[in-house]
């Protein structure tokens, strides 16, 4: 008898089941098991041994669920790594990874068995045998081309596709042929073609791809990346917006695919990447598989199954969860816009960062890794500086493209001079006017997500900060106090500015909706649209807003950070950043970095195609170093200053941040538990512990929340730290007094 350790999609350790050898079960297979008295699950066989474990009763594996082995040894190692590093279980990783293949438990065997999905077959089409012979088609075409031109054309197309794409048996996947079903049916009825249903294969066809010709600078960068890869180094591609990073990726992708390897290209948000997918499709026709949460669970399940059975040569473009897919012969991982916060999953376990996973995957799969961005994260940049990554820079836009001119517009001065109407300075109004009268388009950026009410002096632009944590304080209306969201330091909300002593402090912030209203009043003839979380709840709504703007049916697009991401709009001459101050005042140690990234990214939307674009930044702090760095487009200066601050306050990339989030319906209990946890943590970690503080979201779904933060300096043993944190959590949850308090651990918290 054999015994299998099986992972179940639960926050539980693995359990052992017996294996009947006739089932043909192996490591990595999905199996159905009974767990508890009346629950059935899909599990994954993690290991098999002939040693009977020491339990009295061992239940049998009931069935092997899919004929394809789902999990490769590399995937196993990756999942184990994630579970270990992010302090969760492999079961929770599995629950995340197999959204539709295995997720729900069932109350009967039949129920779970029915839920198995089958992989659809794919139609392949070939000419009939007679026409496939050397002269067959030519003769047929000669005889019929006059009477039935369309028919001979189609037959020609099928034959040519098979040849060009290297389908040696003459069978071409139906999806690659642009021929209607009616036409195919009629050809089949005439006996001219044969169709076959086959398992869907990765496209093993063409290996010669028509890649764009690179500029000299791009070629230099490509060579540098290839050199880095030959030394098994991660490459960080720092290329300004419009420098043609995608063109470089395309060459690297072609390299990998022509070796029969698979490529994973991670993007921060799939809705904004339709332009990218189209571009890739043009070159790697028929190869691109997209993967994201807006696909139906069935589609995602089928993609997972198909990839599990594939031999390689796949090109997957997907969001962060794509790291959990089977990646046959993975040769290259690209992380585009690697600085993007969306790569970190914050709201659900495992709380992983896909950018960091990409680097781990490079090691586990032996794959090459490229991180790309116009504004790299300071984590990656520091790795570039230290030589851990190969740092590759592209400083100029491709072709005749020039970076936009950045104008800083002082709102305080504008107010004093009577040059501000509602939220718009005269500088910006004039620029919008000019763009519109020249038939160009305008993007107005107003950050609202992560918006926290902050206080600013309207005379000098000052906002109060925490002296210990170097973040702005957040106003709490209920208590009339300002509090630090990291350490809890708080002061009564001042009535006069601590900086210039004038009584001119006020609560700031306004949203996109208001901006639309105001700009429409200023430009009654302009067609104004809004792109943000509220207007783009569905992919269709999102697409139609973007398409209207692309088609120039909209003149002014007002949006949140969604407009900063990777769009390539032709007609944009002016970009307005309506309120840079609320970026600078975000209560977050990454505020400076994020503000710089957002402003640079949104600025990058201007003047990509026509003349030099203009970017107008409205701010009460025109002298603020970050504003100056954006104006100069000087990433390196920003990074130098910000890294120094991070180092002196012990923030990432000089430390790892671990956040313990406590939740409970009973506020008093939560308060006591938080202090207990913070106390235990201090016993172990001393001054590295901050808090407890109430969370930014104090009450969510009837639960109160609080958090304790821990900074672990880089170089200290994370392994040991994780062990000590686990002890604290166990000690608290085992304590009867704190029953009902949930504790969540977020490693490398954002
Ligand atoms: P990035 O991703 O760095 O912002 P893109 O790859 O989107 O830049 O390139 C910006 C624009 O320049 C795109 O429209 C792209 O088609 C064009 N481009 C860049 N490099 C080339 C090239 N080598 N050949 C043709 N077009 C290019
Ligand atoms: Zn603080």
Image (spheres, rainbow, N blue to C red):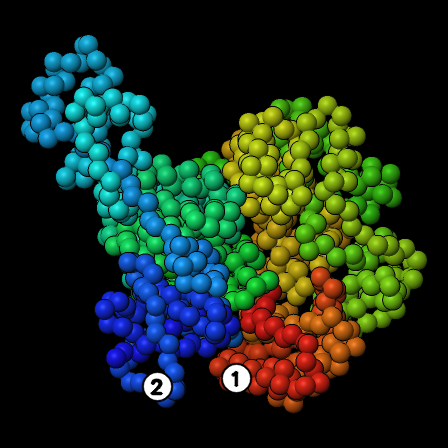
User: Which of the pair 408/67 is nearer the observer?
Assistant: 67
Q: Which residue in the protein does label 2 denote?
A: 53
How far from the left and from the top, in percent, is residue 686? 65, 87
Q: How many marks?
A: 2
Residue 549's x, y, as percent? 59, 31
Q: Is residue 404 left or right of residue 675?
A: left
To which quarter of the image does residue 493 belong?
Answer: bottom right
Q: Is residue 216 left or right of residue 443?
A: left
- Residue at x 57%, y 86% (from the top left corner): 727
Q: Is residue 208 above or below residue 659?
A: above
Q: Is 447 placed left or right of 478 in the picture?
A: left
Q: For the residues marked 1 and 2, what is the alpha-carbon distance in whole angstroms?
A: 27 Å
Res. 346 image quadrant: bottom right
Label 1: element kind: helix
* Residue found at x 24% / y 40%: 197
Label 1 Cα neighbours within 10 Å, binned few <14 / some 14-19 / many ≥20: few
Q: Quadrant of the N terminus?
A: bottom left
Return the x and y of residue 621 as percentages of the image width and height. 76, 53
Secondary structure at badge 2 equals loop
Query: Residue 470: where, in percent of width, then height?
Result: 71, 69
In this orientation, does residue 269 appear? yes
Residue 723 disc label:
1
- Horizontal arrangement in the rendering, residue 171 relative to residue 538 (left or right): left
Of the numbered discs 1 and 2, the one sitting upstream in the chain is: 2
User: In this orientation, does residue 156 appear?
Assistant: no
For residue 519, above or below residue 457: above
Residue at 74% of width from left, 64% of height from top?
702
Q: Can you say which quadrant of the picture contains the C terminus?
A: bottom right
Mark 1 vs ligand 2: CB under 8 Å? no
């Amino acid at each position: 008898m054999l015994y299998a350790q099986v992972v179940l999609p639960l926050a539980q350790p693995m359990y052992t089941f017996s294996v009947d050898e006739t089932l043909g079960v192996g490591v990595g297979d999905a199996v159905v098991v009974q767990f508890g008295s009346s629950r059935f699950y899909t599990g994954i066989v993690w290991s098999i041994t002939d040693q009977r474990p020491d339990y009295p009763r061992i239940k049998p594996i009931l069935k092997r669920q899919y004929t394809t082995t789902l999990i490769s040894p590399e995937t196993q190692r990756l999942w184990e790594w994630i579970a270990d590093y992010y302090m969760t279980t492999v079961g929770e990783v599995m629950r995340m990874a197999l959204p539709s293949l295995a997720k729900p438990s069932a109350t009967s065997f039949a129920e779970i068995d029915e839920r198995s999905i089958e992989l659809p077959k794919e139609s392949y089409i070939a000419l009939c045998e007679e026409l496939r012979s050397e002269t067959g088609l030519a003769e047929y075409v000669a005889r019929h081309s006059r009477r039935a031109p369309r028919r001979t054309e189609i037959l020609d197309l099928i034959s040519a596709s098979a040849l060009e794409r290297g389908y040696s048996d003459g069978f071409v996947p139906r999806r690659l042929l642009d021929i209607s079903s009616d036409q195919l049916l009629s050809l089949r009825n005439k006996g001219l073609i044969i169709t076959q249903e086959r398992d869907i294969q990765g496209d093993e066809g063409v290996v010669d791809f028509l890649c764009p010709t690179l500029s000299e600078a791009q070629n230099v960068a490509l060579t540098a990346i290839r050199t880095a890869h030959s030394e098994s180094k991660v490459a960080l591609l720092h290329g300004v917006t419009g420098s043609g990073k995608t063109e470089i990726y395309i060459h690297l992708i072609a390299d990998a695919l022509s070796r029969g390897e698979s490529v994973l290209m991670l993007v921060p948000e799939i809705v904004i990447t339709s332009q990218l997918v189209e571009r890739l499709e043009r070159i790697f026709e028929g190869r691109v598989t997209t993967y994201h949460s807006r696909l139906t669970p069935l589609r995602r399940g089928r993609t997972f199954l198909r990839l599990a059975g594939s031999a390689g040569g796949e090109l997957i473009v997907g969001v962060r969860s794509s790291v959990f897919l089977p990646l046959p012969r993975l040769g290259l991982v690209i992380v585009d816009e690697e600085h993007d916060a969306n790569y970190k999953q914050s709201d659900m376990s495992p709380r992983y960062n896909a950018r960091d996973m990409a680097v781990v995957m490079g090691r586990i799969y032996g794959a090459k890794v490229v991180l790309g961005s116009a504004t790299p994260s300071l984590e990656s940049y520091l790795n570039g500086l230290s030589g851990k990554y190969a740092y590759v820079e592209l400083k100029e836009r491709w072709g005749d493209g020039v970076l936009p001119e950045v104008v800083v517009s002082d709102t305080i001065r504008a107010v004093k001079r009577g040059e501000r109407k509602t939220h718009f300075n005269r500088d910006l109004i004039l620029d919008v006017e000019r763009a519109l009268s020249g038939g160009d388009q305008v993007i107005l950026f107003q950050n609202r997500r992560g918006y926290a009410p902050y206080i600013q002096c309207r005379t000098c632009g000052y906002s109060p900060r925490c002296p210990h944590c170097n973040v702005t304080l957040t106003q709490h209306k209920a208590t009339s106090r300002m509090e630090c969201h990291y350490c809890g330091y708080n002061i009564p909300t001042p009535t006069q500015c601590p900086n210039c002593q004038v009584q001119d402090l006020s609560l700031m912030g306004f949203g996109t909706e208001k901006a639309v209203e105001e700009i429409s009043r200023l430009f009654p003839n302009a067609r104004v649209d809004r792109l943000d979380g509220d207007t783009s709840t569905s992919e269709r709504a999102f697409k139609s807003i973007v398409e209207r703007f692309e088609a120039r049916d909209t003149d002014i697009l007002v949006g949140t950070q969604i407009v900063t991401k990777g769009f390539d709009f032709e007609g944009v001459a002016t970009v307005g950043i309506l309120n840079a101050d609320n970026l600078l005042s975000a209560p977050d140690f990454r505020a400076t970095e994020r503000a710089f990234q957002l402003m640079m990214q949104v600025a990058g939307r201007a003047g990509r195609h026509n003349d030099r674009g203009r970017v107008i930044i409205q701010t009460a702090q025109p002298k603020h170093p970050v504003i100056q760095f954006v104006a100069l487009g000087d990433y390196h200066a920003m990074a130098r200053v910000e890294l120094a601050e991070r180092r002196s306050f012990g923030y990432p990339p000089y430390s790892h941040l671990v956040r313990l989030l406590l939740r409970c319906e009973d506020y008093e209990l939560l308060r006591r538990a938080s202090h207990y946890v913070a106390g235990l943590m201090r016993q172990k970690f001393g001054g590295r512990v901050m808090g407890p503080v109430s969370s930014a979201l104090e009450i969510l779904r009837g639960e109160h929340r609080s958090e304790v933060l821990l900074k672990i300096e880089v170089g200290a043993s994370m392994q040991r730290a994780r062990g000590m944190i686990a002890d604290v959590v166990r000690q608290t949850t085992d304590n009867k007094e704190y029953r009902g308090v949930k504790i969540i651990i977020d490693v490398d918290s954002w």
